[in-house]
Image (spheres, rainbow, N blue to C red):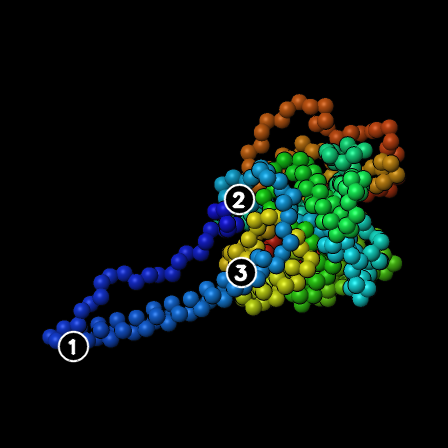
């Protein structure tokens, strides 16, 4: 994998070799046959070259339109840790906000479709966090969902040393904006953009410290982005183990079994947590199923290898997605499409137990165990464990409360293997 592409470049087509056979007035019948064959070959090469040039022109135009249309972020830092050997780790950040990139409320007609309240709700929680690992040969993708309520250490957020991982974005954003206001900044667009850059850097750092592997790229997608993406691909196919009715909160009201959801329904599907046995942990499986279904739609429609369809999809993404600086998404989408049906192993970071801290439901995790599991799943060597007072997760603290005996056990995070876009897993 080179610095510009996330997968090895496709092999070049065959090139002409050999010397031009000179015509001769003494040419034999077989010589004339060879000349006819050569002329036909030249015509074929010429027409192929013309098609390639035309395609290259279209590809270049589409590439420029696609790659220059995104908002890019420098939140990874100037010299972050990088994966080795051509592998790439990508963090997907689903941001639960009802505002656009400049801090303006989304139009009411969109909010109505989202069934997610008005612009005052939601804050800037990173409610969806998925870490993808793609090896250099693109032989298999490993995707770790990171439950949003995992209680983790943080740095650089005034007043906090630990918090729910989802809060690392919004709390850092708020702290930086408050600092800028104290310094006299009054432009709301400047405050929004600089605050969100700080939030991105905070969530990237927090996740990287938790999992113990580099993050090479990230993509942030807004709440509206889930809706737009599902709508752009013509909806998603899902499968539910049980019928659900969450009309009061997410708007998810679906029967059991296989079904096709439009954009608004798909957003409700990935947002529901009330009424699910494992709450947020079941929601992580919903997110995994959503990604699998989107991949299936993209593969079945040929979008990743069709410039026109890919451009239309990217037009939607430009509104809702922020990419890390230097990520060439056009080449990434092209090469991912060329890779065909790639096996994907969906996992969920393990949770030790549930707890209540400062009145909030949290997931207690073992950071050392998480690092070992992630590195093993990514095929990386695990350094020897160093004795530490924080190796084991806390059992009691001064601000924790006893849990009800009926509280379900945490999801064990067993891997779910599938082919990219091939099988839609049934979920709760």
Where's the C terminus, which quadrant?
bottom right
Q: Is residue 220 above or below residue 33?
A: above
Tag 3 secondary structure = helix
Residue with the mark numbered 1: 29
Disc nearer the start of the sequence (1/2): 1
Disc nearer the start of the sequence (3/1): 1
Residue 389, image x, y percentages: 72, 23
Residue 94, image x, y percentages: 71, 51
Q: Is residue 228 above or below residue 322?
A: below
Q: Is residue 357 above or below residue 125?
A: above
Query: 357 or 275: nearer the eye?
Result: 357
Which of pointers 3 and 2 indicates the residue nearer the eye?
3
Is the Cβ of the residue at disc 3 closer than 8 Å to that at disc 2?
Answer: no
Residue 47, image x, y percentages: 37, 72
Left or right placement of residue 363 versus residue 315 in this view: right
Mark 3 and mark 1: Cα distance apart in space? 50 Å
Is residue 240 in sight in this rendering?
A: no
At horizontal 52% and vertical 64% (from top left) the residue drawn is 61
Q: Which mark is residue 63?
A: 3
Query: 100 or 90: nearer the eye?
Result: 100
At horizontal 88% and vertical 39% (from top left) the residue drawn is 359
User: Badge 1: how crowded within 10 Å, few (<14), some, or many (20+)?
Assistant: few
Is residue 181 in sight in this rendering?
A: yes
Q: Which mark is residue 87?
A: 2
Tag 2 secondary structure = loop
Is the Cβ of the residue at disc 3 closer than 8 Å to that at disc 1?
Answer: no
Residue 299, image x, y percentages: 58, 63
């Amino acid at each position: 994998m080179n610095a510009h592409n996330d997968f090895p470049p496709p092999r070049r087509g065959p090139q002409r070799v050999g010397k031009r056979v000179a015509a001769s007035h003494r040419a034999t019948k077989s010589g004339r046959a060879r000349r006819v064959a050569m002329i036909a070959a030249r015509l074929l090469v010429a027409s192929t070259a013309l098609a390639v040039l035309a395609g290259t022109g279209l590809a270049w135009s589409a590439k420029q339109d696609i790659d220059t249309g995104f908002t890019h972020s420098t939140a990874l830092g100037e010299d972050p840790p990088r994966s080795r050997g051509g592998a790439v780790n990508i963090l997907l950040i689903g941001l639960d906000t009802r505002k656009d990139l400049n801090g303006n409320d989304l139009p009411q007609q969109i909010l109505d479709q989202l069934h997610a309240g008005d612009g005052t709700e939601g804050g800037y929680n990173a409610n969806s966090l998925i870490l993808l690992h793609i090896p250099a040969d693109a032989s298999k993708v490993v995707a770790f969902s990171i439950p949003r309520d995992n209680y983790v250490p943080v740095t650089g957020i005034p007043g906090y040393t630990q918090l729910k991982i989802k809060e690392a974005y919004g709390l850092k954003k708020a702290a930086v904006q408050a600092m800028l206001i104290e310094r006299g900044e009054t432009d709301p667009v400047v405050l929004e953009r600089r605050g969100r850059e700080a939030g991105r850097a905070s969530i990237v750092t927090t996740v990287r410290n938790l999992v113990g592997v580099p993050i090479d790229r990230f993509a942030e997608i807004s709440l509206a982005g889930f809706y737009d993406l599902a709508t752009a691909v013509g909806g998603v196919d899902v499968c539910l183990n049980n019928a659900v009715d969450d009309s009061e909160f997410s708007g998810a009201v679906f029967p059991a079994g296989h079904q096709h959801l439009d954009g608004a329904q798909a957003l409700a599907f990935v947002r529901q947590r009330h009424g699910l046995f494992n709450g947020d942990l079941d929601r992580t499986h919903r997110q995994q199923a959503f990604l699998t279904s989107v991949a299936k739609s993209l593969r079945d429609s040929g979008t990743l290898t069709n410039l026109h369809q890919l451009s239309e999809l990217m037009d939607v993404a430009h509104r809702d997605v922020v990419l890390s600086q230097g990520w060439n998404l056009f080449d990434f989408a092209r090469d991912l499409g060329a890779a065909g049906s790639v096996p994907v192993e969906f996992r969920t970071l393990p949770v030790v137990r549930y707890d209540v801290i400062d009145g909030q439901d949290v997931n207690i995790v073992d950071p050392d165990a998480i690092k070992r599991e992630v590195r093993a799943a990514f095929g990386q060597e695990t350094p020897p464990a160093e004795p530490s007072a924080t190796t084991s997760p806390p059992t009691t603290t001064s601000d924790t409360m006893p849990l009800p005996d009926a509280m379900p056990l945490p999801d064990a995070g067993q891997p779910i293997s599938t082919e990219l876009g091939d099988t839609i897993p049934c979920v709760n």
